[in-house]
Image: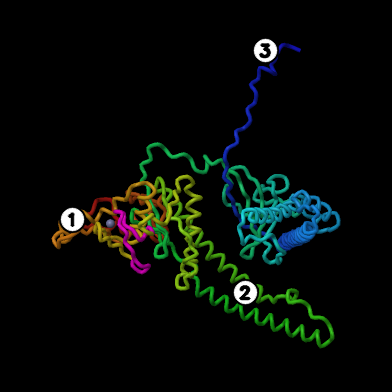
């Protein structure tokens, strides 16, 4: 043995452990493209997991009763733990073929889900919170899927296929690159099809890179509402299409047809049941009456419409969040509950269609630390839409859409002012757009009529539907741009042909040579 100083093993620097970064978990959901046989296999696994879950829940219920009885009799007794249920799952798997066929980690994950539900209930009891119940027996229809808790050999995506241990390989439309370290794979049945959800852990610094010291972008305040989904303090209203409202007639028609199919189904069931009773037999249960082809097809139609509505809503909310994140350095958002809107019978439908809370969650996810939550009340002044930037209280009803301040004379859109109040509370500044009308009116009739100078601000500008990244090019000779109208429609070959023919036409006097807006 050589001395420590000369030993190459000792000379080598001690390997530093990889630092533990704070990670953020992101979920990626991809649709599966399955054959009928594969679909049946997935449903079998879901059914086995559902049976196992209800068995474990039943064990917990019986255990709680035993503990209660034992403690009443003055005997010490313990509640079941996660480890107990792991052992129980092992035992069950030996005696049940379907449970034995499940991957061991999937089985354990069922126990984990039950345990977490129980733990939440224990914690609520300890903290004296009411309304939290322990896991209870559930119907198969509400049990949506199962999880492989470790990405890797047991479950992974390779060459466009999702490989699941014990279930086989499935074609998956993995249209996005998954960033970060993949952690879990969940198979879920929703909207009439199977999905695979991969969660990945990304270091926070990669999701939300630190802001440069000199960021030229302004800060903004945002006011969520029902007239426009979001209005920012610089006077831009973000008003995405109302997904449900636009499809409501189609949905109503499809659901009416579906209701008739169900009526026919019920009639068939009753006929079968009476026939069985006449023969002195016990009728089959409602759940086991086969559904007709028409009923199944109509269920799929309604499911597709609901999926479409959810997708349209999601798409526009993501887009709005991305646009705000691109334009502004920090965004302050007024956070308020939405239950009061949903309880209002005149507003509930619109409020549910707008999905304000989901939009704020999307903003949080997109902006990260650049999202600044602001309360919805100013002490002594009232709500953000009930006070002025000057500090005066300006009470108004919900139908009053214009803010008129008796103290400073500010007249502007209600949401625009509320967004500026939010910006003021978060950053101590207001947008110059609020002052825009002041100059034009300060020497005009506002002063001439005597009294306070009226500062007018026009209605908030509507945000363009096009992405902020697609700026029109100044050079019209480029064939692949729209030359002025940043719309998707302007990108089709038909529009390009029209633009070329117009560009060749004689220019009107006064227009800049070589460039023409359409
Ligand atoms: Zn004022």
Q: Which residues are magenta?
A: 383-400
Residue at (68%, 12%) from the top-left corner? 6
Numbered mark located on residue 298 in the image: 2
Numbered mark located on residue 30 in the image: none
Question: Which structural element holds mark 3?
Answer: loop
Q: Where is residue 147 shown, x and y percent of the image?
A: 69, 53
Look at the image and tell me in which quarter the N terminus lies. top right
Q: Is residue 238 at least partly visible in the picture?
A: yes
| Tag nearer the camera, 1 or 2 | 1
Residue at (83%, 56%) from the top-left corner? 92
Q: Is residue 355 magenta?
A: no
Considering only order in the chain, which callout, 2 or 3, is on the residue closer to the N terminus?
3
Question: Which structural element holds mark 1?
Answer: helix
Considering only order in the chain, which callout, 2 or 1, is on the residue closer to the N terminus?
2
Residue at (45%, 53%) from the top-left corner? 321
Residue position marked by numbered label 3 in the rendering: 5
- The answer to whether residue 343 is left or right of residue 195 is left
């Amino acid at each position: 043995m050589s001395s420590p100083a000369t030993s190459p093993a000792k000379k080598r620097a001690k390997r530093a452990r990889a630092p533990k970064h704070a990670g953020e978990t992101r979920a990626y959901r991809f649709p599966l493209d399955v054959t009928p046989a594969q679909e049946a296999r997935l449903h079998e696994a879901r059914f086995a997991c559902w049976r196992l879950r209800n068995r474990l829940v039943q064990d917990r219920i019986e255990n709680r009763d035993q503990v209660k009885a034992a403690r009443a009799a003055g005997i010490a007794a313990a509640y079941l733990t996660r480890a107990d249920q792991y052992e129980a799952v092992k035992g069950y798997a030996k005696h049940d073929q379907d449970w034995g066929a499940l991957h061991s980690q999937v089985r354990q994950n069922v126990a984990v889900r039950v345990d977490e539900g129980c733990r939440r209930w224990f914690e609520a009891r300890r903290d004296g919170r009411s309304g939290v119940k322990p896991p209870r027996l559930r119907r198969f229809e509400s049990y949506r899927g199962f999880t492989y808790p470790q990405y890797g050999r047991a479950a992974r995506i390779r060459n466009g296929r999702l490989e699941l241990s014990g279930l086989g390989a499935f074609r998956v439309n993995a249209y996005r690159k998954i960033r970060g370290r993949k952690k879990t794979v969940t198979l879920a049945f929703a909207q009439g099809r199977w999905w695979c959800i991969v969660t990945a852990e990304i270091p926070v610094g990669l999701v939300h890179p630190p802001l440069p010291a000199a960021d030229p972008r302004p800060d903004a305040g945002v006011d969520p509402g029902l007239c426009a989904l979001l209005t920012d303090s610089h006077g831009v209203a973000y008003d995405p299409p109302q997904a449900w409202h636009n499809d409501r007639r189609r949905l109503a028609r499809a659901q009416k047809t579906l209701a008739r199919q169900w009526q026919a189904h019920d009639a068939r069931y009753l006929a079968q049941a009476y026939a069985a009773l006449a023969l002195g037999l016990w009728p089959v249960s409602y759940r086991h009456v086969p559904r007709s082809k028409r009923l199944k097809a109509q269920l799929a139609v309604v499911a597709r419409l609901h999926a479409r509505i959810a997708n349209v809503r999601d798409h526009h909310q993501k887009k709005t969040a991305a646009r705000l994140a691109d334009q502004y350095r920090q965004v302050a958002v007024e956070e308020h509950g939405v239950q009061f809107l949903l309880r209002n019978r005149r507003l509930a439908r619109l409020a549910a269609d707008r999905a304000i809370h989901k939009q704020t969650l999307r903003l949080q996810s997109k902006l990260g630390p650049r999202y600044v939550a602001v309360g919805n009340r100013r002490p002594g002044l009232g709500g953000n839409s009930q006070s002025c930037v000057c500090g005066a209280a300006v009470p108004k009803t919900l139908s009053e859409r214009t803010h008129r301040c008796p103290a400073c004379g500010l007249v502007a859109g209600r949401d625009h002012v509320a967004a500026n109040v939010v910006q003021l509370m978060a950053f101590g500044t207001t947008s110059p757009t609020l002052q825009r009308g002041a100059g034009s009116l300060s020497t005009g009739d506002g002063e001439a009529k005597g009294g306070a100078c009226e500062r007018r601000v026009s209605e908030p500008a509507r945000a363009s539907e096009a992405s902020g990244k697609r700026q029109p090019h100044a050079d019209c000779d480029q064939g692949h741009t729209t030359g002025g109208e940043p719309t998707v429609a302007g990108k089709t070959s038909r529009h390009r042909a029209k633009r070329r023919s117009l560009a060749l036409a004689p220019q009107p006097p006064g227009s800049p040579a070589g460039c023409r807006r359409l």
